[in-house]
Image (spheres, rainbow, N blue to C red):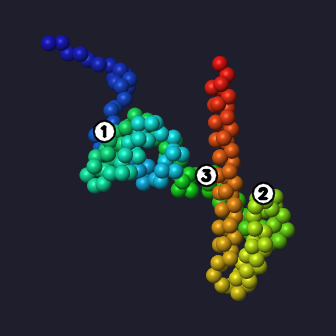
Amino acid sequence: MRHHHSDPADEDDFPEPPSKSSRKREMQALQDLGEQLVALSPERLKKVPLPESLYEAIRAAQGFKMEARRRQLQYIGKLMRKIDPEPIQAQLDIFAGNSAVEVAKMHRLERLREQLLEDEQVIGTIAETWPEADLQYLRTLRRNALKEREAARPPKSFREIFRVLRELQEASDAAAEAEAERAADEDATEQGSNP
């Protein structure tokens, strides 16, 4: 019987396989991600970058109950092992408002609200950015917010200003997204018609 002595340097060429418990944690994390996807509305689910097979499996799980749903979630977890979960997680973070872009957007709106309270002329900036904004309503909210501050009352109007600004921002984001999709569709149609 020959004994094969391996050189310790050779052992570094083969990384340790992941432990059973770390594989189990990864699989559970993917299944949890799958559960988050199943909980999404159909409109939001369409915005998540998913392969067709995974999308169909998630749509099916949304219609299942109890044991069938549990088995389908395991299947979704299995499908997710074959793909990169990062883009999916990034989209879920955007929905949750956790992305850096979303956080920056919220901070911008908060600063705009503060500027509006300090100077009524900021209404002009709002009008330029969002021509559909109800400027009269914003002026009223501004006056009420300043009165609330002076009287140390709950900041109802202050919060309402933010809500109005956020709705204006979301509407313009949605319009820009729709315009980008329309342009992409036109490009695809043009490329399809050019041999």
Residue 139, x across and y down, in percent = 78, 74
Query: Residue reaching furthest left?
Result: 1
Q: Amino acid at mark 1?
A: Ser
Please tell me whether residue 12 is drawn above or below residue 162 in the rendered image: above
The residue beneath circle 1 is 19
The residue beneath circle 3 is 100
- Horizontal side of residue 37 vs 7, given as left or right: right
Query: Residue reaching furthest front?
Result: 193
- What is the crowding at mark 2: few (fewer than 14 residues within 10 Å), some, or many (at least 20)? few
Query: Residue reaching furthest top?
Result: 2
* Lower sequence index among marks 3 and 2: 3
Q: Amino acid at mark 2?
A: Thr
User: Could one spot residue 135 in this view of the protein?
Assistant: yes
* Lower sequence index among marks 3 and 1: 1
- What is the crowding at mark 1: few (fewer than 14 residues within 10 Å), some, or many (at least 20)? few
Residue 48, x across and y down, in percent = 51, 44
Judging depth in this view, the residue of 175 and 32 nearest the camera is: 175
Q: How many numbered discs, if any?
A: 3
Q: Are marks 3 and 2 in contact (CB under 8 Å)?
A: no
